[in-house]
Image: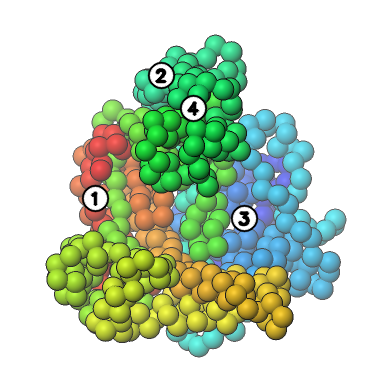
Amino acid sequence: MAPRYALAPDPHGPGGRLQPLADDGTPLGPPEHAALLGPAVAAVEAAERPRWVYAAADSAYAPLLPVRLARCHDLRLTEPLLLGHEGGWGEPRSLGAAWARLRGLPVPADLPEAAPDDDEQAGLFAPDRLQLPPGADPLEAVVAVHAEQLRRIAAIGDDAARARFRVLVAAESAGGLLAAEMARDGLPWRTDLHDLLLTELLGPRPQIPGAQPRRLAELADELQQALGGRPFNPDSHTQVLRAFADRGVQLSSTRSWELRGVGHPAADLLIRYKELSRLHAAHGWAWQAAWARGGRFRPEYVVGGVVSGRWASRGGGALQIPRILRRAVVADPGWSLVVADAAQLEPRVLAALSGDTGLARSAAEGDLYEALAATAFHGDRAKAKLGLLGAMYGQTGGDIGPLLATLRRRYPAAMGHVEAAARTGEDGGIVRSRLGRTCPPPSADWLDLTEAPETAGEAGGRSARARGRFTRNFVIQASAADWALALLAGLRRRLAVFGSGADRPHLVFFQHDEVLVHTPTDLADAVAAEIAAAADEARTLVFGDSPVRFPMSTAVVDCYADAK
C-alpha cells in the first residue's frame, strides 16, 4: 500500500506543510514546513510516490502544477460520496463542513462556485473556500477529516461493497487531479479557424461590442417578413408564438422538432436563427476572448458535477462544443489527436450490471444493436435500439410496448434489473451505482404529493412514475460514469510512462464516454493501444469478471472534426 502524506498549502504564499500518515490516517510524525511547497512535494513524490491527502484539488494541487502527482485522496470529492451513503445527500462538502460535523460545530454552507478569475490580486483576497472556523489549523483539519473518512469507508456494507467504494473514491480523486491538469494544459484551439467559421456563418465580426452579427440581423428581418411584416423580437418566446398565431400557425413551443412539422417557411428560418444565435451567444467572439487564449481552450471542469457522477464545466461550455466548431481543434505541428469513445456504453453497462447472459453475448463484440436485432427482432436494428433505449429510459408510449415485451422474454435479468430500480424509485427509495454512488433522495414535496391520501391520486402517480424513470436510468448512467472514471484514472497512469515533460502525451478533453489525447505523432499508435488497455482495465475494476466488453472506437487525426 502506498504511503500517505497530508498536504496543506499556506493560504497566501508559496510554502506549505506536509505530514506523513499511517494507513489509518493517524500522523506518523510532526508536520514539516516547506518555504517552497512545489519542490518539496516533487521530491517526496519522486522518492515515495505516496497518496497525497488534501482538502481539494483546486486549492492544493492546481497551484503546484506543473508538478504531477500520481495519486491522491481528495477530501472534498470524497465527502459527498460518503454523505450519500449515510443519508446526508446534498449536505455541505467543504473541509470546514466536514470538520464541523466531526467536532459537533455549526456546519457552514458551501460557498457558491465561482467562475475563474484572471486577476491575481483578486485571488489574494478571495474568500477561504475551505470554510474553516477562525483559528482552525488547515493541516490539522485535513488529517482529522481524512482519518474520519477512512473510518466511515471501513464501515460501508460488506467486503465487496466496501472494496468497490474504495475504487470509487480513488477514481473520483484521480478525476480531480486530471481536471486540474486539463485546465492547465488546455485543448488545442486555432482562433484563426474559429474566426473563419464564425465569419462564414454569422458574417463579419461586429465592430460595436454587443451588436448583432449581420447574418442574424438578416435572418430576423426575413423571419419578420415571412410572418407578415409586423416587428417582433425573435428571441422572445412569447412574441414568436404570437407572430406565428397571427398567421394561423398554433405552436405550443419553439422547439426544433415541433417547428419541423409546421410546413411554414418561417419555421425553417426560425430554426436557423436559433441555431446561429445559440452559436453566437455560447461560442462566439466574446467566448473566444474569454476562453481561447494562447492557442488553447482552458475550461474549468467540475468533477461529479452531475448527480450521476458525470462531469460538468464551470463556464466555457466545455461539454457542449458544437460539432462544427471542432474544426478549430487542431493538433500542434508534429502532434496528433487520438480521439476515442466507448461504443454503445450504457447498453453494455446494463448487460454487465444485470449479468444477463443473453445480453452479454450480444454485447460481446461489435455493434450491440445489430446483434440484438439478429437475436430478438428479426434483423430490425431500429426496433432493437428503440426497445433497449426505451427500457433504460422508462419509455412506455407509442409502439414500444411489444418491443419491451420481447426484451422481457429474451433478456429477463436485464429487464428485471432496470424495473427493480424503477420500483425502488417509485416507492421513494434510493439506488446506487455499481461502485456505490448514491442517487438523491426524494424531495419533501415529492413525499407530500405521493404519500398524502388526499393528493396521492393521478398527480402522485405521475410523480412516482417520474422518479421511477429517474432511478431506472440512474443505476445505468451512474455506473457508466463509474467506468469512465476508472478509464480516466487508468489512462492517466498509463500515459505517465511516456514521460512528464512538455513533449509527453496528455489528456486534453473528456466528455462522458469520449477522451482526447494530444500526443507526438510518433506515439499515437502506442497511445491508442493504452486507451484500449485502460478501457479493459476499467471493465475489470468496475464489473469484475464480466464477459461484457467495452470497445473503444479510436481515430488518430490532425483535426477533431475528422474523427467522426
Where's residue 507, x and y in %?
38, 46
Comes first in the chain, label 4 or label 1: 4
* Residue 140 image point, x, y percent: 73, 64
- Residue 199, numbered label: 2
Q: Residue furthest front?
A: 248
- Which of these two is toward me, 421 or 93? 421
Q: Earlier in the sequence, mark 2 or mark 3?
A: 3
Q: Position of residue 22 (x, y in %)?
A: 59, 73
Tell me if label 4 and label 2 are in contact, CB under 8 Å.
no
Q: Which is more foreground, mark 2 or mark 3?
A: 2
Task: Tell me the residue that label 4 is attached to.
Answer: 227
Task: State how far apart marks 1 and 3 are (Cα).
Answer: 33 Å
Q: Are marks 1 and 3 in contact (CB under 8 Å)?
A: no
Q: Residue at x 38, y 83 (%)?
A: 416
Q: Residue at x 30, y 64 (%)?
A: 386
Of the residues shown, which amino acid type is indicated by label 3?
Ala
Kind of residue sitting beneath label 4: Leu
Mark 3, Cα crowd under 10 Å, few <14 / some 14-19 / many 20+, is: many
How many C-alpha atoms fall within 10 Å of the one at disc 4: few (<14), some, or many (≥20)?
A: many
Question: Which is closer to the viewer, label 4 or label 1?
Answer: 4
